Image (spheres, rainbow, N blue to C red):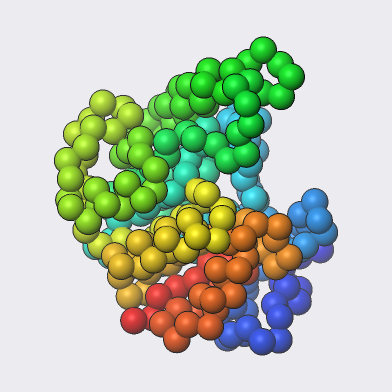
Amino acid sequence: MRTANATALMEPAEDTTTTSSVLDAYRDFPIARTASGIQFVNIADEFIAWLSFANAGMLSKGNLLCFDHAIKNMPRGGAMVEIGVCAGLSTNCLAYYRARHGVTSPFFNCDAWQFEGVVGETLGQSSVRHADYQRFVRESYIRNVRMFSGRDLPHTIELLSDHFFRAWERNELRTDVFGRPSTLGGPIGFCYIDGDHSYKQSKRDFENADRHLLPGGFILFDDSADGTKFEVGRLIEEVKRRDDYRVVVKNPNYLVQKLA
């Protein structure tokens, strides 16, 4: 099935003019389904396939369309910001679409590699300690990004998102995980929120990004599809009611754009 039928993915209440125009641009790509049966347009290509074989991560393939559209259309003068990087799969995808569209604006991201749902000192009943797992994923991130995005390394700051945005507000000079000095701050053109999925934290991440987001800038919320088990779904309902944002596309996670 092809995306000529992609408009069927929309709900009647959505802004069909914006959504249909976005989906129409990807009409030659196939429609796939998530594990729970939700349809989405899948623009994964050969590079994404090879990357996904080697780079561990929990990537919603529908996010690729959102990455591509937001990066292609983000306002000039704004940085790209990614909240939460894990082992670097989404980071490498973002860098790939930056290269595809010739985007050279600054690319910052952050993670402290402190994972949700940690109970006890070891991974279940194994002998693997969570602290060792944390170091392993961090080291995997550095290795993966050096391999697949070596020509466009992001400025990866080892901080929780609240501390990252505090440093952003202050234009702090930080050393990233690749050993480079990086001055934070300035306007944001596109922010991908994929950190703590609780309502309180995802809302703080949204509000912090919003303070710096340029008009016309984009925010993508991971795991925000309708019916999501994560509390970020509650935040999405609030954002959809705001007058200063609009839903650009739902595939099935929500990409929104700031109007003013």
Between 39 and 191, the residue placed more toward the observer is 191
Between 182 and 129, the residue placed more toward the observer is 129
Give x and y (percent) for residue 196: 52, 49
Give x and y (percent) for residue 27: 66, 68
Image position of 75 (left or right of 194): left
Image: 34 above or below 152? below
Q: Is residue 238 visible?
A: yes
Quarter of the view holding residue 238: bottom right
Residue found 58% across the figure and 30% down from its top: 55
Image position of 131 (left or right of 230): left
Q: Residue furthest top?
A: 127
Image: 87 above or below 74? above
Give x and y (percent) for residue 33: 78, 57
Between 247 and 54, the residue placed more toward the observer is 247
Residue found 49% across the figure and 35% down from its top: 114
Q: Quadrant of the C terminus?
A: bottom left
Q: Quadrant of the N terminus?
A: bottom right
Residue found 60% across the figure and 22% down from its top: 121
Residue found 60% across the figure and 68% down from its top: 234
Quarter of the view holding residue 58: top right
Give x and y (percent) for residue 107: 33, 47
